[in-house]
Image: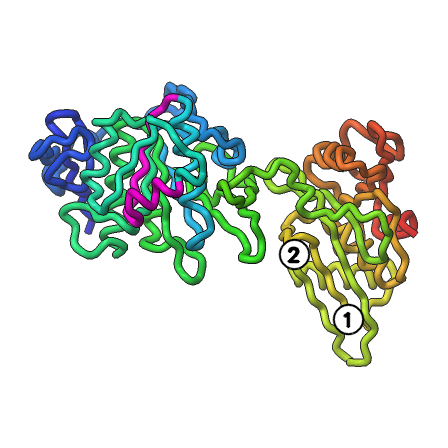
Amino acid sequence: MAKEDPVRYVCVNCGFSTVTRTGKCPLCGQWGTLEAAEPAGARSDKYGAKAEVVSSVSVTPPKRLSSGIHEVDRVLGGGLVPGGVVLIGGQPGIGKSTLLLQVGGQVASRGTSALYISGEESAAQVALRAARLGVSSEKLLLYCGGDLEDALSNVRSQNAGLFILDSVQAVRAPNETGWPGTPNQVRAAAQLAVDVARAANVPAVLVGHITKDGRLAGPMLLEHMVDTVLTFSGEGYSSHRMLRAMKNRYGNTDELGIFEMRENGLAAVEDKSGLYWNRSDTAVPGVAMTIALEGSTPLVAEIQTLASPTAFPYPKRTSRGMDLNRFQLLAAVLEKRAGIPCGGCDLYLNVAGGLSIQDPSADLAACVSLASALKDKPLRSECCYLGEVGLAGEVRPVTRVMARLKEAERLGLKRAVVSGKERGEFWGPKEFTGMKIQRVDNLSEALSDVF
């Protein structure tokens, strides 16, 4: 049996449309103006509408609203989209509210009214944090309370160009059963916020709680309703925070934004490679450099390995920052294809700085680092290794090699070992704007060059 479409209600005063019936229109603030546009289960002529050719649809690129923070704009794909809804989740105390209050302050400082809705804190608490962050503008508006209908009515009455809801689990949607935070309430509150953002054509940012296993709390439908899903994460021992996109209808999901938590708020980290490289002048066996990509951002990564002889029949394998199965595979390739025995040693791999690498371009660096540790010989100084290693021991090309080489050159590296199958602006061992490029076809060739 076909599921009936939900009843849509339309405000006779401003034309606001929603599937959630309320006593007062959340957009214009008038009471008793929402009327059913169509009875439940009714069929209209819209079901007989003909499909159109996609190329004939007129599309105008949206004029994005800058958040005022470059790292946030880059992760979003260029800024906030009018009518678009962003959902950001993260652990308690990670800095979500701090980041969004700074975004609201930056938007307001450029003349666009920003409405910050807090369902968890009092006005005094938010104002105190705003003073600590140095956020002060007559265009930054604050509403504290759990009544979502009253809160959203300020979008139209105050002519807000952005509204932030902190959080979707802390407010109550009208005419919906359950306490705030229950699945029904979360769904209804999110739907109401989405409807207001669409009708007013203003961007909206919703804060979402997460569960113990790291998932966004509430129904999975919540993530489908919004246009963009961001995660804000960090380690308890570090002051650095990472912003990633898990879903983005208006951009890609590969970008990474890095912030540092300071006394006066979150500050964008400009030199991201400096976080993961200690720039030591002393050559140590088992240390190799590579340039990994996080979205479009090249990051220098320091691969450290340690080989320790063991008397036990089952040597230990430990990896942090690289998938353990990948590390074991590379160790097997190194032994089989390059003739360097690994079976009599416990092997340990670490990516310095807490960076986690999924990029296969780090394979070559991991292999030469492990060979260096097993032979107890340091590698060439000021050299980086870029290549994916296959089971046959071949060194494969990597994506965006030119961007990686430019970052390596900026950091002062003088030499790069890459795949012999790389094509593009360079060919063979030659100078690349101050760097020497060494091309290798397989792992054995790379190791002979290294040692």
Tell whether label 2 touches label 1 (CB within 8 Å). Answer: no
Tag 2 residue = 321
Q: Is residue 395 visible?
A: no
Q: What residue type is labelled 1?
A: Asp
Circle count? 2
- Image position of 335 (left or right of 69): right
Residue 237 in sight from this viewpoint: yes
**Magenta segment includes 128:** yes
Q: Looking at the picture, does residue 375 appear above or below residue 146?
A: below
429, above or below 350, in the image: above
Image quadrant where residue 124 sits: top left
434 over 22 or under it: above or below:
above
Residue at x 12%, y 36% (from the top left corner): 24
* Range of residues picked out in magenta: 111-129
Residue positioned 11% across, 27% down in the render? 12
The three-letter amino acid code for the residue at tag 2 is Gly
Residue 247 placed where, x, y %?
45, 42
State left or right for residue 445 relative to residue 363: right
Q: Which residue is drawn at 74% across and 41% down?
A: 397
Where's residue 167, x and y in %? 32, 47
Q: Position of residue 279 (x, y in %)?
A: 78, 45
Quadrant for residue 291, please give it.
top right
Q: In this view, does 250 lie to the left or right of 225?
A: right
Mark 1 or mark 2: whose residue is earlier in sequence: 2
Q: What element carries label 2?
A: loop
Q: Name the residue under label 1.
A: 346
Q: In which quarter of the image is residue 197?
A: top left
Front residue of 53/71: it is 71
At horizontal 39% and vertical 33% (from top left) the residue drawn is 104
Q: Is mark 1 on a helix, strand or loop?
A: strand
